[in-house]
Image: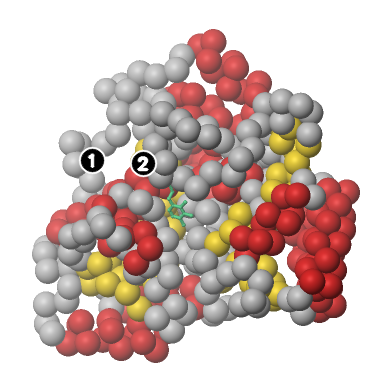
Amino acid sequence: MSSAVMGNYGRIDLAFDHGDGSWLVTADGTRYLDCAAGIAVNTLGHGHPHLVEALKAQADKLWHVSNLYHIPEQQRLAERLCGLSGLDKAFFCNSGAEATEAAVKMARRAMHDRGETSRHTILCSEGAFHGRTIAMLAATDRPVFREGFGPMPEGFGHFAFGNMNALRDRLAADAETGHPEIAAVMVESVQGEGGAKPLPERFFAELREVTSEFGCLLIADEVQIGVGRSGYIFSFEEKGITPDIVAMAKGLAGGFPIGAVLTSEAVAAAMTPGSHGSTFGGNPLAMAAAHAVLDVLESDGFMADVRARAEMLAKGVDEISHDCKLFCRRGNGFLQGLVFNDDIPAMDVVAALRAQHVLTVPASENTVRLLPPLTLSRDEITLLLDVLKTTMDEMKAKS
Ligand SMILES: *Cc1c(COP(=O)(O)O)cnc(C)c1O
């Protein structure tokens, strides 16, 4: 389709008219089971009554005032997110890249504030994805995102995925110079775009220890895995640790644009008036939507049921994987990856599932990502597994 819209996306030839829970519906009434959820955004699916009500009520009251004034809904959301995460202060923006970018600014500023002015480098994992701004392109090591956008800003480095020894050696060498340059280590506990790839079991907890030992900060990029997708509101909750800085976005307001950064008191102290800002950040509409999402996630038994349903999904996928031997499963909660053998392009699987009216998302390392709404029901999981099984049987027959 020729269009006045820029061609920077490879779009699927499909448009939707409305949504209904876990389903997306085209203008002619065709229904698709949405296991993409707007790329991990529609936390409560489509048209969730509590979310719709909250946004409508706020729309009648007040949309936007800017951060020239106090925004009570923002203060309440900050308290709520800090209470849930164990952090002390919240900053609001409008997207993931803005949140990770602000997280980096805050880490550098905290070092500056401490008088450790040589510390400006942010170490990231190989295969990481933290967004598309110029600085966040420097935070990924993947050439596909960077091509033609150089020069890259300085102050970013990479370490081998999940390799604690390599990371520790790097931090030790940096400390030995007497004027260390590393300000922070930034990781996703499960790489989303990287292919639903979890860090090794103990890595996150060890990372907490090692960053503290070497006097640098730990930034958790929870943009994709956060807001319940891991089975916990924050993925580090279950690991019993608290990062210094947490970036959030995608699912936080269930489809309304939002970003947030949570930090410790020590980091926040460096962010004096005028040091950073966002015109739209934390406006009453976004705050109302985020409160509504958290209302549901915090309601009795909801997260426990997410974990139970995610386990049902993982078990079912494992059985199919075991039978067909075309892929391996990895991931956490409702961020699951099906890593296909090289002779089966993940894109073909996404298309085959779509032909059966199931929407999924490709990721790197030949992975198909399942990112359903956290409200995906047991019946819908059964349906998803049936479709996956038939699709794999057909692919097996062809290969
Ligand atoms: C999507 C994503 C981002 C970027 O978010 P945008 O809202 O697209 O800017 C950053 N980090 C992670 C882990 C993501 O998945």
- Judge whether residue 374 can be spotted in this image: no
Where residue 276 is drawn, which disc sits there? 1
Q: Looking at the picture, does residue 213 appear above or below residue 362?
A: below
Q: Looking at the picture, does residue 187 appear above or below residue 354?
A: below
The residue where tag 2 is placed is 91
Of residues 165 and 155, the one drawn nearer to the viewer in this rendering: 155
Of residues 199 and 290, the one drawn nearer to the viewer in this rendering: 199
Q: Looking at the picture, does residue 308 appear above or below residue 251?
A: below
Label 2: state its secondary structure. Answer: strand
Label 2: how many residues lie within 10 Å, few (<14), some (14-19) or many (20+)?
many
Looking at numbered disc 2 in the image, what kind of residue is underneath it? Phe
- What x and y, as percent, mark residue 50? 69, 27
- What x and y, as percent, mark residue 357? 77, 46
Looking at numbered disc 1 in the image, what kind of residue is underneath it? His
- The residue under the point 36% across, 87% down is 166
In which image quadrant can residue 309 be found?
Answer: bottom right
- The residue under the point 42% across, 61% down is 129
- The residue under the point 32% across, 23% down is 66
Where residue 114 is drawn, which disc sits there? none
